[in-house]
Image (cartoon, rainbow, N blue to C red):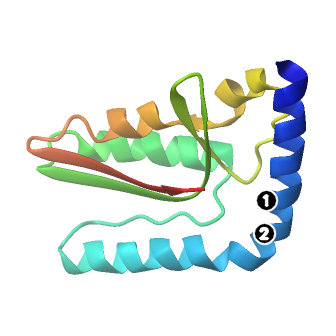
């Protein structure tokens, strides 16, 4: 099982590196478009591009604090993700995934995004565009 994960991870990483140069613009453009739309609707927007683990973790903590008590909160993520054992994970640019065990320590679980938007008074929304 572990060697199959390792092969899949290595293939995915190689493909990700090849596609990164070509496809980086799509997630960045998508995030920019969503940010502009949310700003037009009156949302306070903070954007991260090519976020590393600590950058994303700190931004989610701050966002969760700011979302507490707000009527609405929205998180949009465009980039790479994976599903392992029924859980979804967002893969930031500095993740070094050698084994399946690394996923929980080096990526951000979608649960973290859900928790960050859960303390609103009306609605919290998580939008994922992960490949």
Disc 2 element? helix
The answer to which quarter of the image holds residue 117 is top left
Q: CA distance from mark 1 to mark 2?
A: 5 Å
Q: Pinpoint residue 80: horizontal percent, then vertical percent.
A: 63, 53
Q: Nearer the viewer, residue 102 or 71?
A: 102
Query: Which residue shows up at 18% across the image and 73% down it?
Result: 42
Q: Nearer the viewer, residue 22 or 36?
A: 22
The answer to whether 44 is drawn above or below residue 57 in the figure is below
The reply to whether dot 1 and dot 2 touch (C-beta < 8 Å) is yes
On residue 97, the disc is: none
The answer to which quarter of the image holds residue 45 is bottom left
Q: Pinpoint residue 115: horizontal percent, then vertical percent.
A: 34, 32
The answer to which quarter of the image holds residue 40 is bottom left
What crowding class fits label 1: few (fewer than 14 Cα within 10 Å), some (14-19), or many (20 or more)?
some
Query: Which residue shows up at 70% across the image and 30% down it?
Result: 103
On residue 19, the disc is: 2
Q: Pinpoint residue 21: horizontal percent, then vertical percent.
A: 79, 75
Q: Nearer the viewer, residue 18 or 76?
A: 18
The answer to whether 114 is drawn above or below residue 36 in the figure is above
Query: Which residue shows up at 88% across the image and 32% down it?
Result: 6
Q: Pinpoint residue 68: horizontal percent, then vertical percent.
A: 22, 39
On residue 16, the disc is: 1
The answer to whether 111 is drawn above or below residue 128 in the figure is above
The answer to whether 48 is drawn above or below residue 85 in the figure is below
In the displayed structure, does residue 25 sit left or right of residue 98?
left
In the displayed structure, does residue 18 sit left or right of residue 54?
right
In the displayed structure, does residue 63 sit left or right of residue 93?
left
What crowding class fits label 2: few (fewer than 14 Cα within 10 Å), some (14-19), or many (20 or more)?
few
Q: Quadrant of the C terminus?
A: bottom right
Disc 1 element? helix
């Amino acid at each position: 099982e572990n060697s199959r994960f390792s092969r899949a991870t290595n293939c995915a990483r190689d493909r990700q590196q090849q596609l990164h140069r070509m496809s980086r613009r799509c997630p960045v453009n998508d995030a920019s478009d969503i940010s502009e739309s949310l700003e037009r609707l009156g949302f306070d927007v903070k954007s991260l591009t090519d976020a590393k683990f600590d950058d994303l973790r700190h931004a989610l903590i701050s966002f969760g604090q700011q979302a507490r008590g707000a009527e609405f909160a929205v998180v949009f993520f465009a980039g790479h993700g994976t599903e392992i054992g029924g859980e979804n994970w967002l893969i930031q640019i500095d993740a070094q995934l050698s084994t399946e065990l690394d996923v929980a320590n080096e990526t951000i679980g979608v649960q973290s995004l859900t928790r960050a938007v859960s303390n609103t008074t009306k609605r919290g929304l998580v939008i994922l565009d992960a490949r």
